Amino acid sequence: MRRRLRSFLIRCLLLPVMPSFMWGPVTHPYIAYQAYRKAREDRSGSVNPVIMEAIDRHKDTYIYAANSPDAISTNHVLFNIIIYDYAHNNMPDEPDGTPAFGYRLVAKALERLRKAPRDDRHRYEKELAFACGWLTHQVSDWVAHYREVEREIGPGRPYTFRGYANSHQVLSPCFHYDILVAKREAEHALTETLHDAHIMFTDTTDLFGPGKVRAELPINEDDNLISLVSETFASLGCSKIPSKHLKKLQEDFEVVIGGIQSGILFVKHMQPKLEDVVKEFAESNQGYIDESVDRVIDLVLSLAEEQIVEESNKVERTCGAATAASVVSIRPESIIHKLAFGLGKAIPPTAVDMLFADPMVRVRWDVPVLPEKYDLDVEIHLRDRVRKLLPVALERFGGRSESTRALVRFASELISASSNVMERARDEYCTNLHPVTALDIEPDHFGRGNSDAELRRMINEGVIRIRFTPAKRTDKESTQYLLDADTAIIRINGYLPGEANAPFTAQSYWDETGEILKYEIRLKEEARRGECIHLFADINDRRPEHSQYIDKQIKLEA
C-alpha cells in the first residue's frame, strides 16, 4: 500500500511539468469559448452567420472540439504513433504553413450542411461546430508554437524564439543555446500548465473546472467526417484515419486530461500559494491568450465559405514521383505523459478534493478507564503523510536522468517553499542544470534538427565538430558553472587524442563568448576502415559536474 501511495504521489507532483502540447487541454477550450463570446458580441456583422448559428446550437461541441487535435499528439507521445500528425500540424509544419486539415473539415462540413435535408440539419450543424472547434485548435496553436517572441538571453543579447510556449517564460531565458534546448520541454510544459491551472481556479462558467473538460470527436463508424477528410490527403502520402480508431483516441486523451487536472489539484493542496503563483504568471502573459482569441475570430469564425475552401487547397502536391529521402523521426516517448495517463486511470480530478479533506479520516471511540470513561479522537491528514513521503520518493524517482532530476528538484521546491515560491523553484531548477555536450551544428528554432543525420554527414566528410556548453546563467557571474577545459574527454574507438594508434586528431578553441569550448575532430583514414566508429565526449564544470555527454556508435558500410 505504501509503495502504491508513493507512486501516486510522484505522478501527481510531476504532472505540472509534463511535456507538451501547444496550449494545454484547459486553455484550448477556454480560447474557443472566449472567441465565440467575443464574436457573438461583435455588432459589425463580420462573422460567418452559418458558422455562428451552428455553434449557437452546439456550443459545448465547439468548445471541447477545440481539444480534439491533441488526441493525435497524445497518440504520438504515448505510443510513438506518428502517422496522423498531419491532422494536428500546419502543412508544412512552419510558421507560414496552413492548418489544412482543419480547413478541409470545415469546408466539407459546410458543404454537407448545405446539401442536408431539413430533418438532418441538426446532425450536420453539430458536425460543423465540431469542425470549427478542430480548426480553432490549430489556428490558436500558432501563437504557442510559431509566433516570434523576442527576449534577452543575456545583457544586450536579444534572441528571437519561435513560439510563446518555447520562449522560456518560466525558468529564465538567460542561458547559452544548448542549455535552452535541454530545458525547452520543461519550459513549454510549465507555461501551458500555469495557464491551465489559472483557468481552472478562476472558472465561473462551469465549463473548465475539475472533471468538466473533455475531448469531442465524432466516433460514428459510418460516414465519419474525420475519416472522409483524411482520405483527401492521400496524394500527399498521408495515412487515412479509420473511424474505428477515433473512440480509442478520444478515450486515451480524456484519461490524460483527467490526469493533468488531478495533478494540478494535488499541487494546489500541497502548496497553498499556488493560486497566487499561477495568477501572477497568467495575468502577465494574458496578451498571448488574447492574440489567440483574435486569430480564431479572424481565421475561423469570420471567413466566408469560399475563403475557407481556398485555404483548404493550399497544400496540393504538384510534383511527380519522388525517391526516398529520409525516415521521419518520432518524438521520444514521454515519461510524464505516461504518468498522466496512469494517474488519470487511477483517480478522477473530482476525487482529489475529497482525498485531501481536512482531515481525511477521523476515528472516535470510548476508552473505559476506571473509574472514569474517556473519549479518544484520532485524525489522519493525508497532506501530512505526503510531506513525509515525498523527499525520499522524489529522490528515488530522479534516477540518473539529468533532465528528470532537475524537474524533480523544481517540483519538490514548488510544493515546499513558504515564500517566493516560483523564484525559489526556478532557482532550484536552474542551479542544478548540467553542462551539455552536443554536435556543433546551426541552431534550430523549433528543435527539430536531426543530430544523428548530422553526425553521419560529419563522419562521411571526415570531420566531427562538437561543442561543450556550460550551464551558467548569462545574466549572473556564477563562475562555478564555467567549464574546466582540462577535464574534457574525447574518445574515438576508445582512444584519446595523442595516444599511440589514435585514429584521429583533435583541436580545441573557445567561441566568441569565451565560455563555450569547441573541438574539431579529424578522422584518420584507418578510422573509417572498420565496421563502426564509437564517439564519446564529456567534460566537467568547476563545481564539478559532468555534462550531458555524447556516447554514439555509428555503423559503417563499404
Image: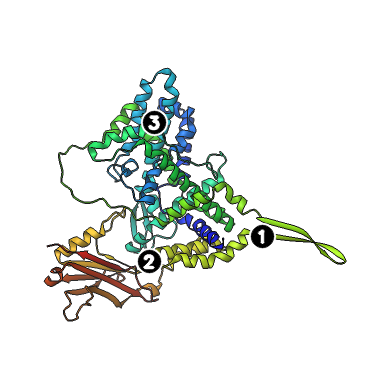
Q: Position of residue 369 (x, y in %)?
A: 83, 66
Q: Residue at x 48, y 32 (%)?
A: 59
Residue 528 position within the rendered picture, expressed as x and y whole percent measured from the top left: 14, 68
Res 166 visible: yes
- Frontmost of labels 1 and 3 is 1
User: Hey, what amino acid is under mark 1?
Assistant: Ile
- Residue type marked 2: Thr
Q: Residue furthest top?
A: 118
The residue labelled by disc 2 is 474
Does residue 549 appear left or right of residue 252 in this picture? Answer: left
Percent of width and height locating residue 40? 47, 30
Residue 302: give its label: 3
Do the numbered discs 2 and 1 sit on residues whose CB atoms are within 8 Å?
A: no
Number of residues whose C-alpha sits closer than 10 Å to that of mark 3, classed few (under 14), some (14–19) or many (20 or more): many
Please give the name of the residue rendered at 14% of the width and 64% of the height, measured from the top-left corner: 461
Residues at marks 2 and 1, CA–CA distance in whole angstroms: 47 Å
Residue at 34% x, 56% y is 332
Give me the C-alpha separation between circle 1 and circle 3.
56 Å
